[in-house]
Amino acid sequence: MLDDIKKPLWATADKLRANMDEADVVEVMIALPGQLFFNTQIPACLWFLAKQKKRKGEVLFIDARKLASMISRVQGELTVDILPALKDLSLPTSFSHI
């Protein structure tokens, strides 16, 4: 436990991601575009976890990086194109892949 304290934060995050992958708990990952949030301009990624997954050994990846429209000079919002994919996560769309 003390060894983890001495490691840099990214090393601990890498270990956590590897453990989640090995445990097969990641159901969906959504890559979001930048400028969605007021306090940061960098892109984000949402991870949806499930103890009992619908698709064992598979992860649904949704690429929403190009699905935002700018509502101001510094702020974007997601378009409604992503909503069907979020409603029925079992159906890949043109911007998702299993």
Image (spheres, grey):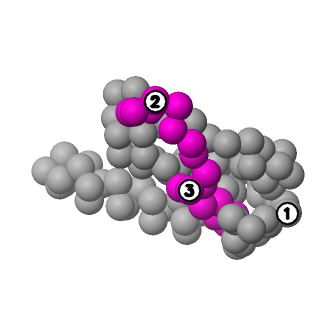
Residue drawn 45% across the image and 65% down it: 18
Q: Hey, which quadrant is residue 87 in on the image? A: top right
Quadrant where the C terminus is found in the figure = bottom right
The x, y position of residue 60, in whole percent, is 69, 64
Of the numbered discs in the image, which one, if any, rests on residue 91? 1
Q: Mark 3 against mark 1, which lies toward the viewer?
A: 3
Work out whether residue 53 or residue 76 is closer to the camera in this orientation and state it: 76
Q: Amino acid at mark 2?
A: Ser
Work out whether residue 15 or residue 77 is closer to the camera in this orientation and state it: 77
Counting other residues with Cα less than 10 Å from the Cα at mark 2, is it few (<14), some (14-19), or many (20 or more)?
Answer: few
Residue drawn 64% across the image and 64% down it: 61
The residue labelled by disc 3 is: 66
Side of 50 where 47 appears, left or right:
left
How far apart are the two marked residues, 2 and 1, measured between alpha carbons?
32 Å
The x, y position of residue 7, in whole percent, is 17, 54
Q: Amino acid at mark 3?
A: Lys
Q: Earlier in the sequence, mark 2 or mark 1?
A: 2
- Boundaries of the magenta span: 59-75
Counting other residues with Cα less than 10 Å from the Cα at mark 3, is it few (<14), some (14-19), or many (20 or more)?
Answer: few
